[in-house]
Amino acid sequence: MRRGLIGGNWKMNGSREFVAAFASRWTELHATPVDDVFICPPIGLFDALSRALPHVVLGAQNVYLEASGAYTGEHSADMVSDLGARFALVGHSERRQLFGEDDSTVAGKFLASQRAGVTPVLCVGETLDERRAGAAADVVARQIDAVVAAAGIGAFNDAVVAYEPVWAIGTGETATPAEAQEMHEMIRERLTKSDQNVGDAIRILYGGSVKADNAALLFAEPDIDGGLVGGASLDAAELNTIRQSLPEH
Ligand code: 13P
């Protein structure tokens, strides 16, 4: 049985004041620490969040693929690990679209995260044009295969996949549970073809306008193991309701 997991991706939002308010609300909601939610604040807010919530599980929104050197503005996987990150998003669609990351860059980041002991969350997903052209499954399969080819299927023993259709991110438009399930099943089958145990065990999160009022139906699907939540993760109470929508709660 796969344990549900929720990631909160704050993207480029927040401030120290925001962190303090979020943390105090989160503390009111949780008498004991929770380990099935990880939060990805901007790097500059890692310290504030981990001081305010010492047990919070942290994730990085991005890492660079080299370990150190003349890469102005970047953070290596070792650096985010040093700051306490246990997860790192790699290949988020905003990175692919706005910052030109291709499959080989994403594979490099996946490998760099694992070398640093940080679990990569490999983000995949098709654009609206690709979906309309009937190419959604092919695009996502290509994104998965590129990392399997570079890292080997065994590397997926310590990885998470997030299926985030680009047309559903920040648009308020969510894939229906059936649409999401179809893609999650395809991703799992693809991994299972290479290694049955990996396919059975890997957690595949859905992302794209997950909210308190649609999470339970999405998480009820057999191959949806949780969510990667953007906008709604900025609200501690809503993020908590989403967490409580995991079937084991
Ligand atoms: P929204 O939940 O704001 O649509 O963002 C999804 C996302 O990109 C999470 O990584």
Image (spheres, rainbow, N blue to C red):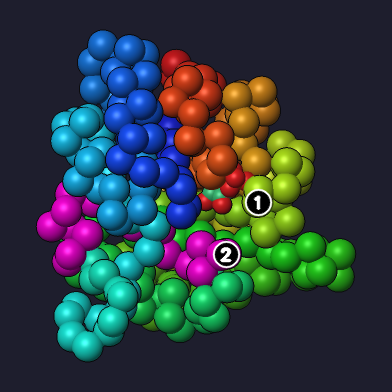
Is 103 placed above or below 184 here? below
Picture residue at 22% right of the left edge, 88% below the top = 70
- When the figure is inspected, residue 181 is found, relative to residue 97, above or below; the finding is above
Mark 2 crowd level (few <14, some 14–19, many ≥20, 10 Å Cα): many
| Pointer 1 residue Cβ closer than 8 Å to ligand 1 | yes
Label number found at residue 169: 1
Judge left or right: residue 154 versus residue 141: left
Q: Residue at x 24, y 71 (%)?
A: 76
Res. 247 in view? no
For the residue pair 198 and 9, the one nearer the viewer reads as 9
SS at mark 2 in the image:
helix
Q: Are marks 2 and 1 in contact (CB under 8 Å)?
A: yes
Q: Position of residue 173 (x, y in %)?
A: 76, 43
**Percent x, y of residue 97:** 60, 72
Q: Secondary structure at mark 1?
A: loop
State whether label 2 is within 8 Å of ligand 1.
yes
Earlier in the chain: of badge 2 and badge 1, it is: 2
Q: Which mark is residue 93?
A: 2
The numbered mark at residue 58 is none
Which residues, given as a range, are shown in magenta? 78-95
Location of the C terminus by quadrant is top left
Q: Amino acid at mark 1?
A: Ile
> In x, y percent, where is residue 244?
48, 19
The amino acid marked with disc number 2 is Ser
Residue lying at the far left of the rendered structure: 82
Of 26 and 138, the residue lying toward us: 26
The residue most toward the front is 17
Residue 85 sits inside the magenta stretch:
yes
